[in-house]
Image (spheres, grey):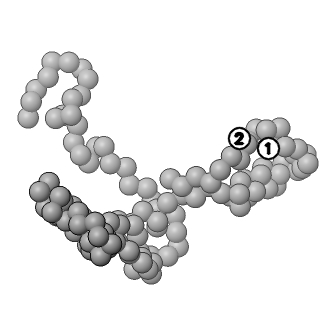
Amino acid sequence: MVESSSSQPNAMQVGFVDACVINPKTMALGKEELKVYVESPVDLASYTRHGVDVVPYMMTQDLNGYFGMLNRPSYKELVKDFWVRAKVYDKEAAKGEKWEKIAKNPSLKGKTRQEMGLEEFKRTEIS
């Protein structure tokens, strides 16, 4: 390992595990209950069928392994792992947030989100 005299950690000093944060499960379903329907993200055979043979270019750049990786089972497992830990903030969640505030303080009924101290709902967010 490279040693550094600075107090700032460099990339060599920070371990991969230190940089990872694994969110707790947010879904009652288990990963094994989810079904992932996979289409080919990049279907090179389809290009060839339509008269655009890009396979030789991919082979020249040694990208055939990358495109093959996208269709392997590991992709399905990553998608499942993401969704059982995902947090979705949509209109329903925003309404629930508002009603939770009103339940704690009934005098807030009829007030706007801003008057309740909540941010305005702009769009669905998935994290």
- Check disc 2 and report the residue beneath it: 119
Q: Quadrant of residue 120?
A: top right
Q: Quadrant of residue 74?
A: bottom left
Query: How busy is the neighbourhood of tag 1: few (under 14 within 10 Å), some, or many (20 plus)?
Result: some
Which residue appears farthest toward the left when viewing the image?
1
The amino acid at mark 1 is Arg
Q: Is residue 84 rendered to the left or right of residue 91?
A: left
Q: Is residue 22 rendered to the left or right of residue 63?
A: right
Q: Residue at x 68, y 46 (%)?
A: 122
Q: Residue at x 35, y 67 (%)?
A: 41
What x and y, as percent, mark residue 127? 50, 53
Instruction: Tell me if I can see residue 25 in this picture.
Output: no
Q: Residue at x 79, y 56 (%)?
A: 99
Toward the viewer: 61 or 115?
61
Toward the viewer: 31 or 58?
58
Quarter of the image that includes the N terminus: top left
Is 42 situated above or below 106? below
Comes first in the chain, label 1 or label 2? 1
Tell me the CA gap for discs 1 and 2: 6 Å
What x and y, as percent, mark residue 80? 40, 70
SS under mark 2: loop
Instruction: Tell me if I can see residue 105 in this picture.
Output: yes
Do labels 1 and 2 touch, CB within 8 Å?
yes
Is 106 situated above or below 114? below
Q: Is residue 50 rendered to the left or right of residue 33?
A: left
Toward the viewer: 105 or 108?
108
Query: How busy is the neighbourhood of tag 2: few (under 14 within 10 Å), some, or many (20 plus)?
Result: few
Q: Residue at x 26, y 48 (%)?
A: 17
What x and y, as percent, mark residue 104? 80, 51
Which residue appears farthest toward the top when viewing the image?
5
- Check disc 1 and report the residue beneath it: 113
